[in-house]
């Protein structure tokens, strides 16, 4: 599987790193694993800088709608995508579809900035 997932329950953080060509089914399996491990509400770093997908934009939008309409949708934690700066347009386009009131989504070109952003969000959530 070209998507490797590490879940830290202690840090309430999911790190998913994708390599090579990933399918729509592999994307769904990664989401399913996160849900089954009780990590849906955790912060997530999804590193797709070294990956691409055979799913077209319409299929990716369907996956987004499936997640958005799930019974646990309100529990979804913030997501920081790490993309290749030269070819992250698909992820940026999907992130732009985020609706008001939904979980925060950020798109970054390096892991350090993505983690920093998630840590700031975590601090804000802890103050509530």
Image (cartoon, rainbow, N blue to C red):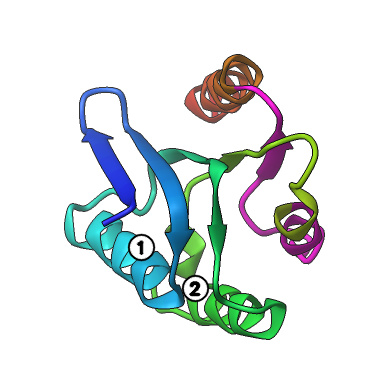
Residue stretch rendered in magenta on the structure: 92-110
Q: Residue 17 lies in what quarter of the image?
A: top left
Give the residue displayed 55% in from the left and 65% down from the top: 53
Q: Badge 1 is on which residue? A: 31
* Quadrant of the rendered image containing residue 65: bottom right
- Seen at 48% across and 68% down, the residue is 73
Q: Is residue 4 above or below residue 93?
A: above
Q: Which residue is mark 2?
A: 67
Q: Horizontal placement of 126 versus 8: left or right?
A: right
Helix, strand or loop status at disc 2: helix
Please tell me whether residue 31 is drawn above or below residue 120 in the rendered image: below
Question: Which residue is depicted at the point 45% across and 75% down?
Answer: 24
The label on residue 124 is none
Instruction: Give the alpha-carbon distance from disc 1 to disc 2, as whole Å.
Output: 9 Å
Q: Is residue 103 left or right of residue 33?
A: right
Residue found 58% across the figure and 73% down from its top: 64
The answer to if 99 sits in the magenta stretch is yes
Which badge, 1 or 2, comes first in the chain's sequence?
Answer: 1
Quarter of the image where one finds residue 72: bottom left
Question: How far across and down, in percent of the image, does residue 57 sit?
Answer: 70, 77
Q: Is residue 116 above or below residue 105?
A: above
Image quarter hosting the N terminus: bottom left
Mark 1 or 2: in front is 1
Residue 26 sits inside the magenta stretch: no
Q: Residues within 10 Å of mark 2 (few under 14, many from 20)?
A: some
Q: Are marks 1 and 2 in contact (CB under 8 Å)?
A: yes
């Amino acid at each position: 599987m070209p998507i490797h997932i590490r879940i830290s329950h202690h840090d309430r953080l999911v790190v998913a790193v994708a390599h090579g060509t990933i399918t729509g089914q592999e994307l769904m399996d990664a989401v399913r694993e996160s849900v089954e491990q009780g990590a849906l509400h955790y912060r997530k770093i999804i590193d797709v800088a070294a990956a691409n997908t055979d799913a077209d934009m319409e299929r990716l939008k369907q996956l987004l709608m499936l997640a958005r309409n799930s019974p646990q949708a309100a529990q979804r934690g913030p997501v920081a995508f790490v993309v290749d700066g030269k070819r992250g347009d698909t992820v940026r386009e999907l992130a732009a579809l985020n609706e008001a009131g939904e979980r925060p989504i950020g798109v970054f070109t390096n892991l350090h900035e993505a983690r920093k952003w998630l840590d700031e969000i975590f601090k804000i959530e802890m103050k509530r």
